[in-house]
Image: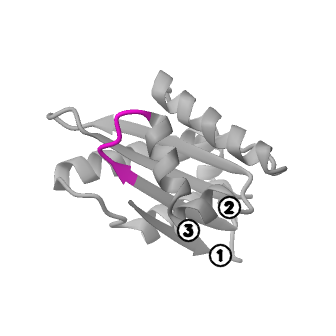
Amino acid sequence: MVSCSSDSSEAAPNAANEAALNAVYDYSSSELELADLINEHRVSLGLNPLQTINYISVKSEEHDEYMIGKNTLNHDLFEQRSQDIIQALGAVKVNENVAYNYVAPSSALHAWLNSPGHKANIEGDFTHFGIAIRENADGKKYYTNIFIKK
């Protein structure tokens, strides 16, 4: 598990904004469960629930597929992913959590909450997020959770 963050004060939505906002993503039951668990945790602390944005989940899925291809957990290309989201959605802050080999979404969340950096992302000043969970050929799950503030 690792977490990454990027701040930008130059968020300027462009023509990609409309396409990004209209992105289609088919959430699995595990992804919806993880999103609900994160929001339940946030609300239990008096924080705002986060809204999903399909485009962020698409970017999360792309990163899961990248990690599966590399057979390793990483934040490779985070700056590019972050800048893409900033440009497409007008985000002013982007953070990312990744995890590997947790059978259930609740296990991944529990591990993130026991890690100060990941917990800070989950409980941070964000407005939206995206989630993807993908399995490699051996059935091991890769998780990417990207948080943004608009």
CB atoms at circles 2 and 1 under 8 Å apart? yes
Residue 2 vertical position relative to residue 103 in the rendered view, above or below: below
Amino acid beneath label 1: Ser
Is residue 14 among what the camera can see? no
Residue 83 vertical position relative to residue 102 in the rendered view, above or below: below
- Neighbor class of circle 3 (other Cα within 10 Å; few <14, some 14-19, many 20+) is few
Amino acid beneath label 3: Pro
In the figure, residue 142 lies in which quadrant? top left
Amino acid beneath label 2: Ala
- Neighbor class of circle 2 (other Cα within 10 Å; few <14, some 14-19, many 20+) is many
Residue 148: give its label.
Answer: none
Residue at horizontal 69%, vertical 58%?
Answer: 123
Residue at horizontal 64%, vertical 33%?
Answer: 36
The C terminus: image quadrant: bottom right
Residue 8: give its label.
Answer: 1
Residue at horizontal 45%, vertical 71%?
Answer: 79
Mostly what secondary structure, the magenta segment? loop
Percent of width and height locating residue 49: 76, 43
Q: Which residue, given by chain and number where applicable, does mark 3 sit on?
A: 116
Q: Which residue, given by chain and number where applicable, does mark 2 sit on?
A: 91
Q: Nearer the viewer, residue 58 or 44?
A: 44
Report helix, strand or loop for mark 1. loop
**Magenta includes 44?**
no
The N terminus: image quadrant: bottom left
Write the start and end of the magenta stretch as one range: 99-104
Q: Nearer the viewer, residue 115 or 56?
A: 115
